[in-house]
Amino acid sequence: MVTVPFFTPEEKKTFFSVYRRLLSDLSSCLEKDDIRKMKALMKQINVTDCYGRDPNGINGLLRNVSTALIATSDIGLRRTAVIAMLLYRPVLKKHIPVEEVEAVFSKEVSLLIDRLRKTSDLYARNTAVNSENFHHLLFSFAEDVRVILIMIADRLCMMRLGKQIGEDSRLRLATEVSYLYAPLAHRLGLYKIKSELEDLSLKYVDPEQYSYIKTRLNETKRSRDAYIAEFIEPVRRKLEAAGLQFDIKGRTKSIHSINSKLKKQQVDFEKIYDLFAIRVILDTPQERERSECWQVFSIVTDMYQPNPHRMRDWISVPKSNGYESLHVTVLGPQNRWVEVQIRTRRMDEIAERGLAAHWKYKGVREERGLDEFMNDVRAMLETQDMSPLDAMRTFKMDLYRDEIYVFTPGGELLKLAGGATVLDFAFAIHTQLGCRCVSGRVNGKNVPIRHRLNNGDSVEIVSSPTQKPKQDWLSFVATGRARSKIKQAIREESAKTAEYAKELLQRRFRNRKIDVDEAVLMRYIKKKGFKTVTDFYLDIAEERLDVNHVLEEYLELERREREIAEHPEVRSAEQFVAPSPPDEIASNRDVMVIDKDLTGIDYKLAKCCNPIYGDAVFGFASTQGIRIHRMNCPNAREMFSRFGYRIVQARWSGKTDAGYSVTLRVIGHDDIGIVTNISSIIAKENGMTLRSIRVDSVDGLFQGDITVLLGNTSAMEQLIRKIKGVKGVKQVSRLF
């Protein structure tokens, strides 16, 4: 048994429970002396407390062991990954040399630890993913898929421990999970983990909506169970009569899924018909899987009328992440539409556990769909000059998209992201074919390159040797592969053009017998407002800048700089004003710090959520500049999920005397003098101004929207507490 210092009694109890379950899960794959070797290393490092507590106050060893249990039981990672996870932190903190780990266990363990170390900023702390560390994550992911699987397991562990984390960190973690790790789990076929991550994210980001849906599900459980039993019983009898071995059950859909339907369909909870699905799971040999699944399909659709528009066949052509199932929606008792999912035991385990089940049934580490996904990631990372921001955007494009299936002229099946165009198809075949694509023939008809493809289309590409990639292609392609290849081709073409312009400018300088000072030229380019030297030369190549004019301006700048150097300006000590130190700037002139400690950047507070000093916030880069939003802004989820590459970190800093506008909704009994009492409270508060008040009174119920100018969240919370103390006030809440 291992010793566990620096634990509270409750943590110690939890640790040993998790530790025993972990050993039980790994019993079949551990080597003979693994436990003895691990105990010896643990004794060596325990006295140092190298695990410690992370910034959220969570015991590091307990977090690592809990993450390891998720990785084994829910994902299927085995010996190497678990040992690497447990020893990663001691190696990172240099308490154990990685060479010793290799000598005691294996080269593979030390190699995985080294790959985890590259993502230490992401794995060790609860930190929002920005474009730079996301790039590091992608490189590690491309090297070894186990890295991202461990990251997903760690984020699920952190989400389960969410109550132990501060509210600000919890919100950042939840938004990070919703826009990156849940889609990644989905892409890798980890549906069970994906659903739990999404539900927990909704619970932390929008607790009121989560609680509402959960309460309504509990209230309707009895009637829902009765309906499921009514639907299942005749189906069960028919399947038993056919001699099939099976389980059939009803499964309530996830809270996150129901919330998405509420938003998408714009209906009340009572009007969502597909709160649950019926699942038929067959026990059958692999060679009879398809025939028996279609037999069940035939029995169900004979009994209940199917909806032809809601039928999905992922058995004949599985999804890229390995998902296999038949889905059909039928009209059940009481004229209610019910989704029926038909699959085998093998398919169900793959659907729930993704890669873990693939390894179990196939005996290989990577499926073809995962291979293709990994190849796309590697190809994207190999693209020259791709910025971290581009990498983040390109990678996220394919995570949550539905798939379509199209055919080459030779009948070969090709999977593409939903919304893919003829041009996406061309780049999926070959990069050169994509670069030279001018049009296509879909099902025998001529179509433009931006034509969107549908399931079952037969596609032929028409190309021309004179065609070149264009910037506007990026506005309609749907796949990350096409986008990265187009950008790469445009950059290469721009580099050639810029080189030609550079030679032209140098030739003009030589003709005038002028020796170019590169430092002066760089200052000239910067003064002209160009972000890169390439942009400057492209403007010359495309004749937006006249070469002779550039030459004259360069000479004028060089002359002025020479004069300043020869006759420097002399100032007295009295006229000299020392620049303000960074802390003073942060505290007095700029209370918002953007990204990596950048101050002085222009930004505006978003009107959709009206953040005030002290709110947990993030920045969103739009065409109008940086907009600062609250972490629980009603639009935050949409921005993180669709435009994660535009998100930048932001935080308040120093002190401010500025006033921020906040609107509070007050509900209570329409007592005489309630408005006067509230106004009086606001008037007595220092640094607070009542801007407006709008009052409605219906059937003795008072509702008022009060807009106040105040300094920070502490002042707002104090005001809310005081208003709640007014006689007759029942509820006070902040409006977005």
Image (cartoon, rainbow, N blue to C red):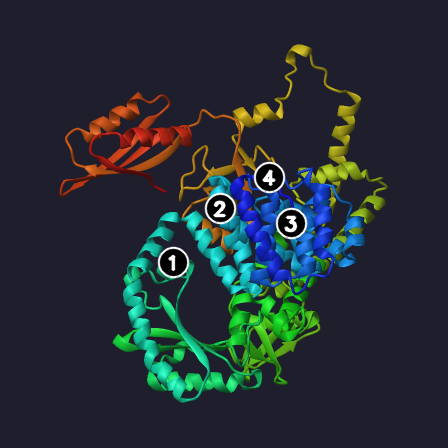
User: What secondary structure is marked by label 1?
Assistant: helix
| CA distance separating discs 2 and 1 | 21 Å
Foreground mark, 2 or 1?
A: 2
Three-letter amino acid code at the position of disc 3: Met
Residue 134 visible in rendering: yes
Vertical comparison of 368 with 560: above or below: below
Question: Between residues 340 and 544, which one lies in front from this camera angle?
Answer: 340
Does label 2 or label 1 sit earlier along the sequence?
Answer: 2
Foreground mark, 1 or 3?
A: 3
Describe residue 117's horizontal placement relative to residue 646 as left or right. right
Does label 1 or label 3 sit earlier along the sequence?
Answer: 3
Q: Label 4 crowding class (10 Å Cα cut-off): few <14, some 14-19, many 20+?
A: some
Does label 4 or label 3 sit earlier along the sequence?
Answer: 3
User: What secondary structure is marked by label 2?
Assistant: helix
Residue assigned mark 2: 162
Question: Between residues 61 and 443, which one lies in front from this camera angle?
Answer: 61
Foreground mark, 4 or 2?
A: 4
Three-letter amino acid code at the position of disc 1: Asn
| CA distance separating discs 2 and 3 | 29 Å
Does label 4 or label 2 sit earlier along the sequence?
Answer: 4
Residue assigned mark 1: 259
| CA distance separating discs 1 and 3 | 45 Å
Three-letter amino acid code at the position of disc 2: Gly
Residue assigned mark 4: 53
Residue 1 shows which numbered tag?
3
| CA distance separating discs 4 and 2 | 15 Å
User: What secondary structure is marked by label 4?
Assistant: loop
